[in-house]
Amino acid sequence: MSDDTAAATAPKKKGGGMKKLLLFVVAPLVLIGAGVGGGMVVAGKTGGKEAKHEDPNRPKLVAKEGEHPSTEGPDPVNPNPAIYKSTYYPIETPFTSNLRDTDGFLQIGIGVSTFYDSKMIDSLKDNEMPVRSAVLETLAQQDADFINTPQGKVALRGALKKAINDVLSRRTGFGGVDDVYFTSFIIQ
């Protein structure tokens, strides 16, 4: 009987081995290959190069007349001011805030600059209320003695730039304010 069972299973083993090879080796390799290929297409990579999927609503850098930015693309964090044109936008209403740990207050007027097109300024206008709130929160954290120094004013400009860009990045996905300028500055 053991010879009969061995003879009965031998042909099945030979045919079953080919099916097992297809089922457990070839099929998973095909599925893995399809998954990797599909993942690369979804990720935008083709032929080892990354495809650019640029948002048409995202602000674009504005080159100065006669300047031609490199084909490698600009540094979006620190665009070269020798190549790109600054656009200035004054925020109309001044900001008035109490200062930290004092009875004094600060009233400032500010304007911003950007190397990006009008979409950046439109984004700033559309988000004026949260930007104003962030500026006022930043002002309320300031020390009167420190911001009355040249170094304090420079630090305050940097803090305001960061606060404005943080709000714009959260709300629109893009900061873009290059610098903040004082149009008036009163400490009392």
Image (tube, rainbow, N blue to C red):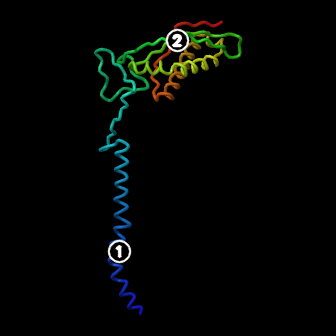
Give the residue type that dot 1 points to.
Gly
Q: Quadrant of the N terminus?
A: bottom left
| Image-based side of 137 in relation to 66, left or right | right
First in sequence, mark 2 or 1: give its number.
1
Of residues 78 and 112, which is closer to you in this image?
Answer: 112
Q: Position of residue 60 (x, y in %)?
A: 37, 24
Q: Position of residue 145 (x, y in %)?
A: 66, 11
Residue position marked by numbered label 1 in the rendering: 17
Q: Is residue 162 above or below residue 52?
A: above
> Label 2 neighbourhood size at 10 Å, few (<14), some (14-19), many (20+)?
many
Of residues 57 and 84, which is closer to you in this image?
Answer: 57
Task: Estimate the spatial distance between the alpha carbons at disc 2 and disc 1, rounded to whole Å.
Answer: 78 Å
Q: Is residue 149 above or below residue 8?
A: above
- Classify mark 1: helix, strand or loop: helix
Residue at 65%, 15% in the rendered image: 143
Q: Position of residue 140 (x, y in %)?
A: 64, 17
> Label 1 neighbourhood size at 10 Å, few (<14), some (14-19), many (20+)?
few
Residue at 38%, 19% in the rendered image: 117
Residue position marked by numbered label 2 in the rendering: 110
Which mark is drawn over residue 51?
Answer: none
Q: Position of residue 130 (x, y in %)?
A: 55, 22
- Classify mark 2: helix, strand or loop: strand
Farthest residue in the bottom direction? 1
